[in-house]
Amino acid sequence: MAVELHVCPAAVHYKWLHTPCFAETRMAPKTVYKAETFTQAFLKNNTSAHDTKSVLILEYSKAKKKKLTKTKPKGINAHQKKELKIFHIKSEHQRYELFSPLHELWKQYIFDLCNGLNPTSSPESVQKKLLKADFHGAIIIVIQSKCPSYVGTTGIIIQEFKHVFKIITKQDRMKVIPKRNSVFKVEINGFISYIYGNKFEHRASERSAKKFKIGGTIDL
């Protein structure tokens, strides 16, 4: 809509110019009135006379949130680990002197775990902590076994599995000692702990949550 302005000495006069949208502008109040009338009649017929505070919502729906599905990475199974030789130690690395620093780290780890291994420490308390400790780097001695050739074998544990210990001897020979039907001795700072292999057939990660009984027996 355009407006034409005429300036006179007496006053300012406005003159409306006829445009095509003027008819639509004049019809707007009637349209608004009809909409208000329809809305009031609709609300009157669809709301309860006793419930004056109710609110009527037309065509409203809450947007649904899309659930994000997390895909967990698939691990490799035991057969694939064997094919990839993940736990294989090369022959040139099977030397006792290479694992001596690991034993020193293990001793410091046990000292911290058992609060220093003082002479006043309770043997039962130390035993419980050792049974749940990580034994990679510990020096063990096989004192009993169904297989006589294992008895007296001494070495540093370089790998621990559910059913066996892999140790490296001072002669730079790697041996696999089964836990079942074997008794092992671990000595550190004057404390001697005996491990009964039949009760020790757990992975190192699972053993921390396992409850052990002090002492044990073995059938040989």
Image (cartoon, rainbow, N blue to C red):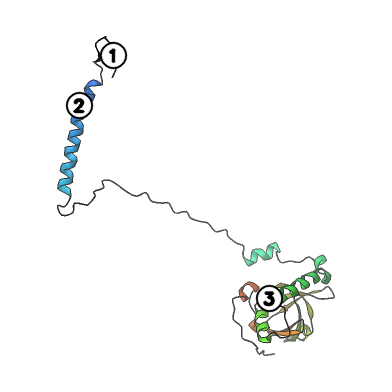
Above or below: residue 36 compared with residue 67: above
Q: CA distance from mark 1 to mark 3?
A: 96 Å
- Residue 6: percent from the left, percent from the top? 27, 11
Which residue is rendered at x = 77% and y = 86% of the image?
148
> Mark 1 vs mark 3: which is more N-terminal?
1
Q: Left of 75 or right of it: where is 184?
A: right
> Mark 2 vs mark 3: which is more N-terminal?
2
Above or below: residue 80 compared with residue 141: above
- Whether residue 16 is visible, yes or no, is no
- Residue 170: percent from the left, percent from the top? 84, 76
Say which amino acid is labelled 3.
Leu
> Mark 1 vs mark 2: which is more N-terminal?
1
Seen from the viewer's position, the closer of residues 113 and 85 is 113
Q: CA distance from mark 1 to mark 2?
A: 23 Å
Seen from the viewer's position, the closer of residues 24 and 173 is 24
Say which amino acid is labelled 1.
Glu
- Residue 220: percent from the left, percent from the top? 70, 90
Going by the picture, which residue comes out furthest to the right? 171
In the picture of the structure, the residue carrying the numbered disc 1 is 4
Report if the CB atoms under discs 1 and 3 are less than 8 Å apart.
Answer: no
- Whether residue 52 is visible, yes or no, is yes
Q: Categorize mark 3 by other alpha carbons within 10 Å: few (<14), some (14-19), many (20+).
A: some
Which residue is rendered at x = 66% and y = 64% of the image?
81
Quadrant of the image occupied by residue 131:
bottom right
In the picture of the structure, the residue carrying the numbered disc 3 is 113
Above or below: residue 76 compared with residue 5: below
Which residue is rendered at x = 63% and y = 72% of the image?
205
> Of the numbered discs in the image, which one, if any, rests on residue 27?
2
Q: What secondary structure is found at the residue carrying circle 1?
A: strand
